[in-house]
Amino acid sequence: MRKRTLLLAATLTTGLLTALPATGAAAAPSGLNGDFNGDGFRDVAIAAPIGKVAGKSGAGYVAVVYGTASGLDTGKRQIISQDTAGIPGVPESGDYFGDRLTTGDLDGDGYTDLIVGVHGEQIGSTGDSGVLTVIWGGSTGLKTATDISSPLPENRNELGWSVATGDFDGDGDTDLAAANIAFPELNVFEGPFTRAGTATELVGTDTLEQTGINADKLVAGDVTGDGRTDLLVMGQEEFTDGYRTRSVLYNGTASGLKAGSKVAGGYDAVIADVDKDGYGDIVTGNFMEKSATEPNGGPGGAITVTYGAATGLSSRTPVRITQDTTGVPGSAEKGDGFGWSLSAGDTNGDGYPDIAVGIENEAIGSIYKAGSFAVLRGSASGLTGSGAKVFSQDSTSVPGAAERLDNFGSAVHLTDFDGNGRAELLASAMSENTGDGAVWLFKSTTSGITATGSKSFGAATVGGPTGDAYFGDVLAG
């Protein structure tokens, strides 16, 4: 038995999607991670996975907004779907294009590419499903795309259920990891890739057989500090009375990924060196209450920090943080969803990555599941509650108003869009306006994230159709 959270939603949106070209002069590739058009500023992809495309409910699309010296510019944008020229496939109901995203320079040309795991895509009349669509970066942005055509796993069942990139073998080429509900559960496509959709080699791993943990979510980062990317595989494992959430770290080696130590389970994670000791730390989020099946949950949800070391994991005791942790505003209440979403970035320029934590089910006063997010500070002693901030739509200077079932904080994303050395924060409320969705941009100062000057926008602002779309359900860049 496996626990798979499927996106099941109806949509009433209308409108034909067409790509809107990114404006501005062509640029040489910056080589900056997250820079699709190579102009030296990071960009963002915003998924609207239940958007209606060409009359098909739940076909889905992605909005791309480009960074500039003045920050994220919603006038410099495009809409990408399977109805866009140059993108493989055709819009179909239930494809949910965009609900699995990652980025990386797969072909080594200095431009970041966008990878979409279209896990619901049916392969002709076969029983196979799931494709990996690579939208190639270039001087004018994301324009053309290719489905990875070879090598491919023998069995494909929702290939692309989760996707992550990194240099897992340290050879200088970006590799792509993709989860597959069929065996092998973990597929690593080794780079470099060609724009014809071919990878150098495919390595399939049955994580369930190797570790007892299935591959539900993949999170990449360098835990050991050796320059190779490690991969956190999150899923469930069997125990005496059933199944419980659990994760395992696969260490990057010269010969590829090798199974290592088990760590705290959950439903989202990020790897970042929060204490700046040279080793990536694993921050896992479990929005559930603590129980036998959710051992790393907490009252209203919890995050767990497992510190990295040269051998993989530090001997330091993992640290659990909830809204009852000293310094974290608010209080832990059942069902808050603390840890629903996570992102890492240095918000105040002190060199320590901070962690944004989505609390998408938090009640604001008596308003049910209005949602909020917290920003926790990294420091020499690690991640703590000291100096933490919490924001909601009820916070001063934040546009909009807290409303029932908005789910503000459903996704969070920290990125330095303007190149000033501090990460700004994007937070979404996928259920804003009963399912339309919207995104909020928060600026940063030397004191960290601030609500002053924050702004919000939805699909219509960036050229997408209005209506139910879950705009902002996934943020990547």
Image: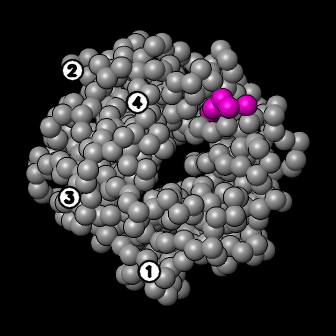
Residue at x-position 59% and y-position 57%? 345
24 w.r.t. 253: above or below: below
Frontmost of labels 2 and 1 is 1
Q: Earlier in the sequence, mark 2 or mark 1?
A: 2
Toward the viewer: 11 or 89?
89
In the picture of the structure, the residue carrying the numbered disc 3 is 464
Residue at x-position 29% and y-position 49%? 62
Residue type at numbered disc 3: Gly
Magenta stretch?
A: 226-232
Residue 58 screen position, x and y as percent:
24, 48
Frontmost of labels 4 and 3 is 4
Q: Earlier in the sequence, mark 3 or mark 1?
A: 1
| Residue 154 falls in image quadrant | top left
Characterize the local packing of mark 2: few (<14), some (14-19) or many (20 or more) Cα atoms within 10 angstroms.
few
Residue 176 screen position, x and y as percent:
48, 28
**Disc 4 and disc 1 in contact, CB within 8 angstroms:** no
Tell me the CA gap for discs 4 and 2. Answer: 32 Å
Query: Element at badge 1?
Result: strand
Tag of residue 109 = 4
Tell me the CA gap for discs 2 and 1. Answer: 49 Å
Tell me the CA gap for discs 4 and 1. Answer: 36 Å
**Disc 4 and disc 2 in contact, CB within 8 angstroms:** no
Tag of residue 453 = 1
Left or right of 219? Residue 410 is left
Q: Taking the image as drawn, is residue 69 in sight?
A: yes
Tell me the CA gap for discs 2 and 3. Answer: 29 Å
Toward the viewer: 193 or 58?
193
Residue at x-position 26% and y-position 50%? 25
Q: Which of marks 4 and 2 is nearer the N terminus?
A: 4
Toward the viewer: 396 or 368?
396
Frontmost of labels 2 and 3 is 3
